[in-house]
Amino acid sequence: MRIRNRKASRRGRGGVFDLAKGVGRASALVQTILGRIFLLTDQSSGRKQLRRVCIRPLRMPRSVLCDLGGRPPHTAPETVRCPSMGLSCGLMLSVQGIKRGVKLFAYLFTLLGIHAAEPDFGPNVLVFDPAQAGMQARIDTVFEEQERAQFGSGRYALLFKPGRYAIEVPVGFYTHLAGLGRLPGEVVIDGHVWTDAAWMRHNATCNFWRAVENVTIAPPDGVNIWAVSQAAPMRRTHVRGDLHLSSSGWSSGGFLADSRIDGMVKAGSQQQWFSRGSSWGEWTGVNWNMVFACCENRPEGAWPEVGLTWTTDPPVAREKPYLTVDAAGAWFVQVPPLRRSPEAGTTWANGEAPGVAVPLERFYIAKAGIDDAASINAALELGKHLIVTPGIYPIEAPIIVRRPGTILFGLGYPTFRPTTGKNALRVEATAGVIACGLVFDAGPQESETLVEFGTPGTDAGDAQNPSCIFDLVCRVGGYGPGQAKRMVAIHTSHVLGENLWLWRADHGAHVGWTDNRCETGLLVEGDDVTIYGLFVEHTQGYQTVWNGERGRLYFYQSEMPYDPPEQSAWRSPAGDGFASYKVGKDVQAHEAWGLGVYHVFQKAAVVAERAIETPTGPGIRINHALTFRLGGGKPGSGIRHVINDQGSEVITSQKATIDTYP
């Protein structure tokens, strides 16, 4: 057999054909990415066989290569490079080869943004329209699977096209409900969108990992129940009635943004809560620590008698991107704009949906069981944005983002799990990256850091185009074995974060002092980082370390680790235990509002010297901080001070507060 070279192919010699030419727009785009595909003639048999594919700019994932034939999966390398700076693999174009090629072209069409009229998000994304039959049964089936699946593998998104729906939508674990209109009023659910923790005797302190956004809820009885705790955001939602945040049991949330409640918000047993850019007819019930930023209609009471922090002057805000479908059936990701000195209330009250509509064709749609780090990184290198569909993604290498302005959009709580001790996500671009709705689980081999924005030693950023993080979850243990030194590191300056839950598991599988080790939840090295709603729990060292200048934090919730086995195993350079929130000793300017640190030391009578550790310069200011002793801890355990050496103990007492510090 003789293979003709590239020069011969350009002269059109000897039966060498360029298959990409003249096959329309799709083939032209394929040619742009793949280079040239040569049809080679087997001179001995006269059969035309596709023997070699040279792919210049693309690293083809092993999952695609192996399905195309030539090598079994256990012997195929991750990629095979040819001398012409591309990929090369032996392929036989037979009937079987054609079938195997289907996956290649499906992969290429996704890279190129060539979608069917209805995009293929996979089986766990349910797209509804008002005329569809059988909706209630499908929704009930998902809830039956997910209601108790706290550490299950199921992940789902329920998407509703514009219109009215007379249905009931219970929302279980790892379920993401979203309307597809430009405004919340374009998708109306004449029923309830609810979660009530009946599976746990109405104790909602474990009602995690669920979301609702961009819909109008019109409950027939006037009351919608959203009894949740961490990582269960309600965004861009209009409730035509009352909203109850608990269901006759404990609850420990939570997050509300860009939403309007026509009636009363009844907080009930909620221990803490963060709300931003929202309004309601009335808010009743404020317990330990509730922070309201740029909201309308202030609840009654004042700190410290009532755990209320009300602020109207945050410097910057941005809403999370969301999916839309227009009247012609075209799909977009709507990216709201950055807002300086944001006004109180919702962004959509005047009937407008500001921002940029990015066509779905510009996104690579990743699917669990098909995509890995190689295929996702290949798409990102080609300039694609990313939609990650529901599922669990074991990855051997980190997802790497190098292009400024890249959007990473999680749909249905997709979960990345590194298997080799590397990062799960590394954002090397220093401006304009948006990551939202993603879950990162530590693997059994310890990762230094699960998620990194920027790289150590660099603090470049863009104040006019900051990178943004929305609804990010990191976990170490609970679902299975996991180890990580830290969960998130922000090295880049001018980063905006919102609703981050960084959790070393206190229950579930592979949980113990030496089982699911994690030192720190969040490390901030960049300057001018702003975070709304930070939840960090149970790590074994300083839970949050903030070394960047001019950091601003609105709402902090943290439980100290339940399980230090003895005091000698849990001691910092500053004394007994570790502060939960530590501002670096050289920081000159830092401000935070509404910080709550709780403890229940179940294994030993250990003590933390302080909950919060900061320098004392004129640019440092902590507004409204508290410590709280939960039930069930060992006698004599607790926290001696709230901030540094200020504030009373919660060893024999239950609660201590500070108004402002210093």
Image (cartoon, helix red, strand yellow):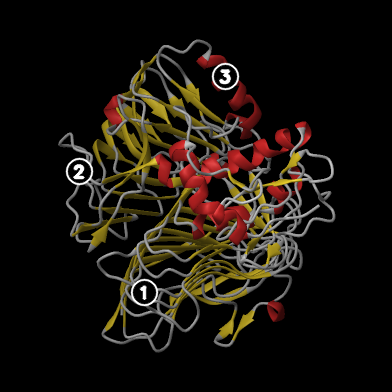
Instruction: Tell whether 212 sits left or right of 4.
Output: left
Q: Amino acid at mark 2?
A: Asn
State which quadrant residue 121 falls in: top right
Residue 221 against residue 175 in the figure, above or below: above
Residue position marked by numbered label 2 in the rendering:
297
The reply to whether residue 153 is in sight is yes
Quadrant, the C terminus: bottom left
Q: Position of residue 585 (x, y in %)?
A: 42, 87
Instruction: Tell whether 76 sits left or right of 609.
Output: right
Q: Position of residue 484 (x, y in %)?
A: 65, 68
Q: Position of residue 581 (x, y in %)?
A: 47, 72
For the residues labelled 2 and 1, say whether their Cβ atoms are less than 8 Å apart: no
Structural crowding at the residue carrying mark 3, measured as other residues with C-alpha within 10 Å and reported as few (<14), some (14–19) or many (≥20): few
Residue position marked by numbered label 1 in the rendering:
493
Which one is earlier in the sequence, the residue at label 1 or at label 3?
3
* Label 1: element kind: loop
Residue position marked by numbered label 3 in the rendering:
138
State which quadrant residue 460 falls in: bottom left
| Nearest to the observer: residue 150 or residue 224 | 150
Q: Which mark is residue 127?
A: none
For the residues labelled 1 and 3, say whether their Cβ atoms are less than 8 Å apart: no
Q: Amino acid at mark 3?
A: Arg
Structural crowding at the residue carrying mark 1, measured as other residues with C-alpha within 10 Å and reported as few (<14), some (14–19) or many (≥20): many
Calculate the distance from the C-alpha at mark 1 to the C-alpha at mark 3: 45 Å
| Nearest to the observer: residue 413 or residue 610 | 413
Q: Amino acid at mark 1?
A: Ser
Count of numbered circles in the view: 3
**Which-is-in-front pick, marks 2 and 1?**
1
* Label 2: element kind: loop
Structural crowding at the residue carrying mark 2, measured as other residues with C-alpha within 10 Å and reported as few (<14), some (14–19) or many (≥20): few
Q: Position of residue 340 (x, y in %)?
A: 19, 60
